[in-house]
Amino acid sequence: MDEVLLSVRGLVAGYGQTQVLRGLDLDVAPGEIVAVLGSNGVGKTTLNKALSGVVRVGAGEIRFGGERIDALAPPAIVAAGLIHVPEGRRIFPDMSVQENLELGSFRRGKPNRAANLERVYATFPRLRERRGQSAGTLSGGEQQMLAIGRGMMGEPRLLILDEPSLGLSPLLVEEMFALIGRLNADGLAILLVEQNVMQSLAVATRAHVLENGRIVLSGTGAELAQNPDLEKAYLGM
Amino acid sequence: MFSPDIVIAAVLNGLLTGAVYALVSVALTLVYGVLHIINFAHGAILTAAMFAAFFAHQAGIDPLLSVLFIAPAFFALGYAVQRWIIGPASHGDDRNILLVTLGLSIVIENVLLAAFRSDTRSIDVPYGFSVVDLGFVFLPMPRVIAFGVTCVVAALLWALLTRTDTGKAIRAVAKEKLGASLVGIDVTHIYAVTFGIGAACLAVAACVLLPSYYVNPRVGTAYVLVAFTVVVLGGMGSVPGAMIGGLLIGVVESLSGLYFGESLGQLGIFLIFILVLLVRPTGLFGARA
């Protein structure tokens, strides 16, 4: 299985005494979009934070490109090319759009900063228009573009997108999923963590449903979309 | 009423004093803005730096020269104190940090007391009593130098924060810690760098202050009380606010000394302070709540 980019085995993580993830297995191969679905509070964001080193891993192992990363701090994980675009965007509000993007290459991709900036601006022409504006004054959709653009600046080998469609209007949600498809078509592996089930399944190569810190259903996007258990699992019945 | 010349002289003298207030306040507000802590050890670090400058002078090095190695040494010291004492001892809890910095200030002051007793010391420099003659007003040379050095430090700080990746990382951590971690910024390192920059600013302030001031183990306290006022007045965490606020407080103190009498000079500071907070509770440059 050296074709696997990200491999998670028996992952246990949480906050203090509270266990959120209770033994989770997951693989992402190069070029795939893997969707992780589930309702609020099942551990989706904790999974992302454990992968990016923000939340300490209690047990289990995470391998990225063959190397163990579960004991590494966030800067080392970013340096390896696993880049997490967090829920709620977490942009730097009083810095300009361009400064936000430049900081995306703080740890990785610095030699190609100018070229990558051009690429992000080509993907998001709106960001180019607003390059000098404070990021905090952007609309929600623009802030989400900025967060993804900032992630792309670090030349990700795997991009984790945490709820990229959250808080966007239906039209923008369509655009967001189209964008995710385009990024992936260029060869980028994506771990997509979403509440938006049907649209996620439509773009995903494979998908997993998370419930109570464990994966309860897995399959290709098309299989899961047809699976009558999906609704049950998703509603926690 | 006083003649315009006297008033202008008071304003200029106030600006010169205010520059040192600004420098001490910038250090305090930067640490607050990034680490979100009130550094109670601020005054003690200033005092320690003044002792360093004093003993460098005893060894024959003018403070304007010794600043070139005292400032880097205090940067390193500040970095180490935050990274290996304050950070680990506080376990990320703001109340703990408060107490750790308070404890640190008590330790520093008492070590200085034990080592050097409570004697007040001052130094003689060749330019100590020189003046700059502007035609209608004489300005004391040591304070003019202090003003010039403060302007240089402010410009350097501005360039650092807006032009370098480290400076941008400092601003990023100040507003969005998680976002900063996720682009690979080492938050612990940036905290320590910021604390180090604060200590280095204090070291510069100490070196320009010493020729026209004195040093004893409690000397920092007076400056820090003013610095707290400036930081709140300028807006907590705002670097431009601390610069402008420092100069403003210097002028206010000087003018109220002129009008109310020298011993009541500080009265004006707190009057302005209360007035500004009544109108703008978040300070002159603070974000609106």
Image (cartoon, coloured by chain):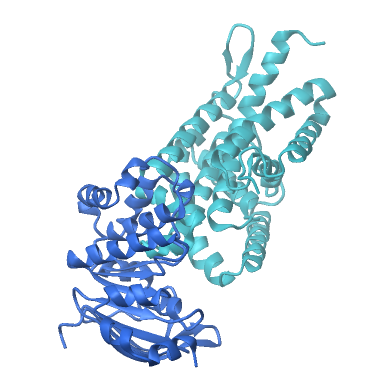
Of the pair B134 and B38, the residue shown nearer to us: B38
Quadrant in the rendering for residue A38: bottom left
Colour blue belongs to chain: A
Residue at the left extreme of this rendering: A2
Query: Which residue is located at x 42 percent, y 62 percent?
Result: A170
Q: Is residue B55 left or right of residue A161?
A: right
Asked if residue B176 can be seen in this view, the reply is yes
Asked if residue A8 can be seen in this view, the reply is no
Quadrant in the rendering for residue B210: top right
Residue B48 horizontal/vertical position (percent) = 59, 50
Residue A114 horizontal/vertical position (percent) = 23, 47
Residue B247 horizontal/vertical position (percent) = 63, 30
Q: How many marks?
A: 0
- The color chain B is rendered in: cyan
Residue A108 horizontal/vertical position (percent) = 27, 60
Q: Where's the N terminus of chain A, which quadrant?
A: bottom left
Q: Is residue B116 left or right of residue B157?
A: right
Establish if A11 lies above or below B210: below
Q: Is residue B288 left or right of residue A31?
A: right
Query: Which residue is located at x 41 percent, y 80 percent?
Result: A47
Q: Is residue B127 left or right of residue B96?
A: left
Query: Which residue is located at x 66 percent, y 66 percent?
Result: B95
Of the pair B48 and B95, the residue shown nearer to us: B95
Query: Which residue is located at x 32 percent, y 83 percent?
Result: A225
Establish if B261 lies above or below A187: above
Of the pair B36 and B56, the residue shown nearer to us: B36
Establish if A183 lies above or below A116: below
Quadrant in the rendering for residue B50: top right
Establish if B36 lies above or below B124: below
